Image (spheres, rainbow, N blue to C red):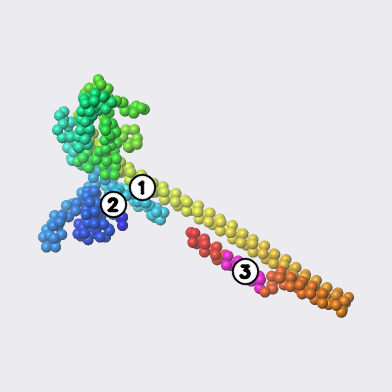
Amino acid sequence: MVQRLTRKDLFELVWSEPMKNLSVRFGISDVALKKTCARAAIPTPDRGYWAKREAGKSAYQPSFSERPPGMDDEVVVGGGGNYWYQEWSKEDLLAPLPQPPEFHEPIEAVRQRISKLVGKLSVPRDVRDWHHTIERLLKEDEKRREKQLATGYSWDAPLFQMTFERRRLCILNTVLLAAARMNGRPTVSRDARSIHLTFYQQHVGIRLARTKEHTRRGYGATKPDESNDTKLSFSILQSLSSENERISWQDDDKGKLESRITEIAVELILTGELQHRESALRRYQWRVKRKAELEEEERKRKLEAERRERERLKRLEQARIDRLLKDAVAFQQAGVIRRYVEAIRLAYECTSPSGTEPFERWSKWALAEADRIDPAMGGAFLRAMRDEDDAEKTKTTTDNLSV
């Protein structure tokens, strides 16, 4: 019983009746419904809310909140917690199109909302509060360091011991902590080179590397002589599979990345919202295009069906004409045979009046053949007409079922 609702509609539903009653309508448990609301940033009534209402007491109900950046305005209820894209049927796609996606909150207002929540950021030299993702990388790096000291081998050397790499982690750590305030969930490779953040249904790719480091061979390794003076760039990519940059910052004469960390974090979170809006418009444009394609396919199908029907009727009419001509010829042949038999009878009676038995056998056979080929005998032409009508009705019924 998967259903799609807007956040506003679901918010009004969960505050209109108890969750246990409402969940039955969706075919799920009240716990599952509450989790669905949590994923959509929709507050739900606490346990004592409905008891207070029934007792006539006042109960607090929060106001409906704006959609977080990157979140879809549609909520899937009963989808097992997965983000479910609707499988459009042909009938759905041919139905009247909905209104194009509209975003009532200007993008600049979204940016200001993010800025207010993020606040002013800084990159501390001595980090005390590591994001759990960075903390995991540092613990793994410490294991590599201990293993190297124990074995003396260098092929699995620590990755983040150098000043430059520590600086990268400090900048990345500040960004991840800021993104976490807007539900940003990071995915970071073991060397912190491949990075993307997920804001609900949107995945934002970033690159934090040496300036002009990325070449056709990939990311270059950190050089031993690199220091904190090595120039660094921070890029937000067009998409996860693209190397094209949507926006980029780098160390320059105006200052280092650390001095722009607030702007970087805000734009990173805002990119989740921009991607959501771009995706919503693309889905709508795809639906418009697909509907036009289906309508054109339907038009061609009807034209082809009409052409086949005209050809069928033409063949049927020609077959009836051919049968008519064939029956007319057979009718003439039957008449000729009968006249011939009568003529022979007259001639035979004159020449052989006493021995008519052989002639009678022959004439009986000949007249039977005339009756056999005569379409007028026994209503044969009527049976042929009925067969044609039955064939026409069967063909019409088959065509209707196929349509």
Question: Vertical placement of 83 versus 355: above or below?
Answer: above
Label annotation for residue 284: 1
- Disc 3 marks which residue? 385
Nearer to us of marks 2 and 1 is 2
The residue at the point 87 percent across, 79 percent down is: 354
What amino acid type should be assigned to the residue bearing mark 2?
Answer: Gly
**Image quadrant where residue 325 sits:** bottom right
Is-magenta flag for residue 386? yes
Q: Which of 152/227 is in front? A: 152
Choose top left, top right, bottom left or bottom right for residue 167.
Answer: top left
Residue sticking out furthest to the right: 351
Name the element at disc 2.
loop
The secondary element bearing badge 3 is classed as helix
| Circle 2 residue | 80
Magenta-tinted stretch: 379-391
Residue 14 placement (x, y as % from top left): 21, 56
Nearer-the-camera pick, 119 or 232: 232
- Left or right, residue 105 beside residue 381: left
Residue 110 image position (x, y, % from top left)? 23, 42
Q: Do we see residue 261 in this rendering?
A: no
Q: What is the C-alpha distance between the residues marked 3 and 1?
A: 56 Å
Specify whether residue 308 is in view.
Answer: yes
Asked if the residue at tag 1 contacts the one at tag 3, i.e. Cβ–Cβ closer than 8 Å, the answer is: no
- Examine the structure image and report whether residue 300 is included in the region drawn in magenta: no
> Which label lies toward us, 3 or 2?
2
The crowding category of the residue bearing disc 1, from other C-alpha atoms within 10 Å (few below 14, some 14 to 19, many at least 20), is some
- Is tag 3's residue or tag 1's residue first in the polypeptide sequence? 1
